Image (cartoon, coloured by chain):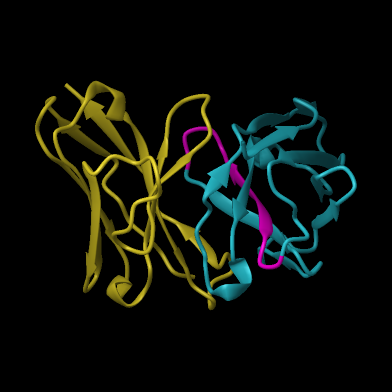
Chain colours: A yellow, B cyan
Amino acid sequence: SYVLTQPPSVSVAPGKTARITCGGNNIGSKNVHWYQEKPGQAPVLVVYDDSDRPSGIPERFSGSNSGNTATLTISRVEVGDEADYYCQVWDSSSDHPYVFGTGTKVTVL
Amino acid sequence: QVTLRESGPALVKPTQTLTLTCTFSGFSVTTSGMCVAWIRQPPGKALEWLALVDWDDDNYYSTSLKTRLNISKDTSKNQVVLTMTNLDPVDTATYFCARIRYCTSGVHYFDLWGQGTLVTVSS
């Protein structure tokens, strides 16, 4: 099965930039999607197809994908960005074709 | 407004069957390209995709769980139902339903999610 690896945690001060990585074998050949999850709330799609933003998502959220690493970048971090973030790809050869990363807890200091 | 909401029992005994219902509004699961999926998250762990039903009544399951799962839709009620048999404590998780628009056109991300429902498996 395809495996996506994320750092367990990232800490960032308000106003600074947070970068969350998602590692996978040749992930650059796949479309990567990112979700924000806050306790007790529905997960929210924040980036799809590597770098596109759904309507209503601030421009502060951006994504990139190349080689074996995809990255979600949150610029000018706000307290409200504190959440868990998950990357996701579709891999037809996996037992679970919709593959999620291990998740990263973003803490705003 | 497009919404999804999960419902089901909060506590299930081991070996029992779990039935979860996803009730949605603002879209129809019979619209061409529409899909609804179930995803779960054990406490403190990552998300895991379980099953998906598409607008054309095709069903897809996680290979490792397919013998225990059944997904179906009730278009008259705007609902998608997931049943999971032979529950075990390791199935304790928050269960989410989520939508994929244009899933049969190569779109593979979940654009809308429900808030989830916590299911605990314990005797």
Q: Which quadrant of the figure has residue A36? A: top left
Q: Does A31 sit left or right of B82 as displayed?
A: left
Please tell me whether residue A85 is drawn above or below residue A97 in the rendered image.
above
Q: Does B76 sit left or right of A55 as displayed?
A: right
**Which residue is at 30% across, 51% downward?**
A6
Q: Quadrant of the N terminus of chain B?
A: top right
Which segment did they paint magenta?
Answer: B32-45
Q: Any magenta on residue B39?
A: yes
| x then y, percent, for residue B82 | 79, 48
| x then y, percent, for residue A47 | 35, 52
- Of residue B16 and residue B123, the one placed in the foreground of this image is B16
Q: Does B81 sit left or right of B47 as displayed?
A: right
Please tell me whether residue B81 is drawn above or below residue A14 in the rendered image.
below
**Which residue is at 24% across, 44% downward?**
A59
Q: Quadrant of the C terminus of chain B?
A: top right
**Which residue is at 70% across, 64% downward?**
B61
Please tell me whether residue B13 is drawn above or below residue B73 in the rendered image.
above
- Of residue B86 and residue A11, the one placed in the foreground of this image is A11
| x then y, percent, for residue B25 | 72, 39
| x then y, percent, for residue B88 | 74, 41
Q: Which quadrant of the figure has residue A27? A: bottom left
Q: How many marks?
A: 0
Q: Does B37 sit left or right of A12 as displayed?
A: right
**Which residue is at 70% across, 31% downward?**
B119
Please tell me whether residue A37 is drawn above or below residue B31 in the rendered image.
above
Q: Any magenta on residue B69?
A: no
